[in-house]
Amino acid sequence: MPPQVTEHLEVDKAGSLLQSCNIPRVLWIFGYGSLIWKPDFEFTSRKIGFIRGYSRRFWHGDSYHRGNQEMPGRVVTLLEDVDADTWGVAYEVRDDQVRSSLEYLNLRESLLGGYMCKTVEFVPQGMEPCGSTFALVYIATPQNPLYLGPAPADAIARQIVGCCGCSGYNLEYLLRLAQFMHSICPGVEDEHLFSIEAAALALSLPLGGGPTVGQE
């Protein structure tokens, strides 16, 4: 069982935590989008698992990593949904890793991505119902100017297929996320993600297939 986080961080408090003298010695950070395959910070361990009460949606705009100002891409955020679980990866950071990871994620997720921080209950794969721990997660809300909101799957797919940013093709982002669910979480249904994946593949294959999931 992962060690429990002793300090419960409230919404949008990661930046304040960096300024305080009470940075926890151990922290878990949950990723449900690109953090799954590209954390880019040092960590002690990682665990596959899920958080309860949220569904993953391609409702957030991205004008830097997977799009630009003229053609923003679409990336995932979380929507409160009492009946849903969202699967991803949680990273354990300890001691000096805590500050360095929070500083990095404050830039990547908050300043460039427009996400806010919240704590959630993370359940490692195979540890339910009694193996949960608190984890920090980044969520974009409708108050964010980059927030795009809902759209039909085919419309989201068309937007994704046509966008590229500093971190690569928006389509690559979608396919990496879908590959994670298909290969690491077989049997877990994610209708929103899989419907967009199918629509994007139908659009991109006649054009030569687009980027592969192995592309950096």
Image (tube, grey):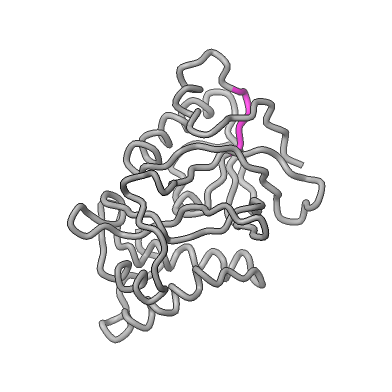
* Residue 97 among magenta residues: no
- Quarter of the C terminus within the rendering: bottom left
Residue at (48%, 60%) from the top-left corner? Answer: 57
- Image coordinates for residue 98, horizontal then vertical, percent: 53, 28
Q: Against 15, is 59 above or below? A: below
Residue at (45%, 64%) from the top-left corner? Answer: 176
Residue 27, quarter of picture: top right
Residue 82, quarter of picture: bottom right
- Which of 152 and 114 lies nearest the eye of the viewer? 152
Q: Is residue 110 left or right of residue 25?
A: left
- Which of 105 and 111 lies nearest the eye of the viewer? 111
Q: Which residue is situated farthest in the bottom direction here?
A: 206
Residue at (29%, 58%) from the top-left corner? Answer: 168
Give the total of numbered labels: 0
Q: Which residue is situated farthest in the top direction here?
A: 21
Q: Is residue 5 left or right of residue 111?
A: right
Q: Is residue 191 left or right of residue 77?
A: right
- Image coordinates for residue 164, horizontal then vertical, percent: 26, 61
- Quarter of the N terminus within the rendering: top right
Residue at (58%, 30%) from the top-left corner? Answer: 9
The residue stretch that appears in magenta: 24-28
Q: Against 62, is 159 above or below? A: below
Q: Against 203, is 144 above or below? A: above
Q: Which residue is situated farthest in the front direction here?
A: 143
- Which of 69 and 108 lies nearest the eye of the viewer? 69
- Image coordinates for residue 104, horizontal then vertical, percent: 41, 34
- Which of 91 and 42 lies nearest the eye of the viewer? 91
- Image coordinates for residue 167, horizontal then vertical, percent: 30, 53
Q: Which residue is situated farthest in the right direction here?
A: 130
Q: Identify the main secondary structure in magenta.
A: strand
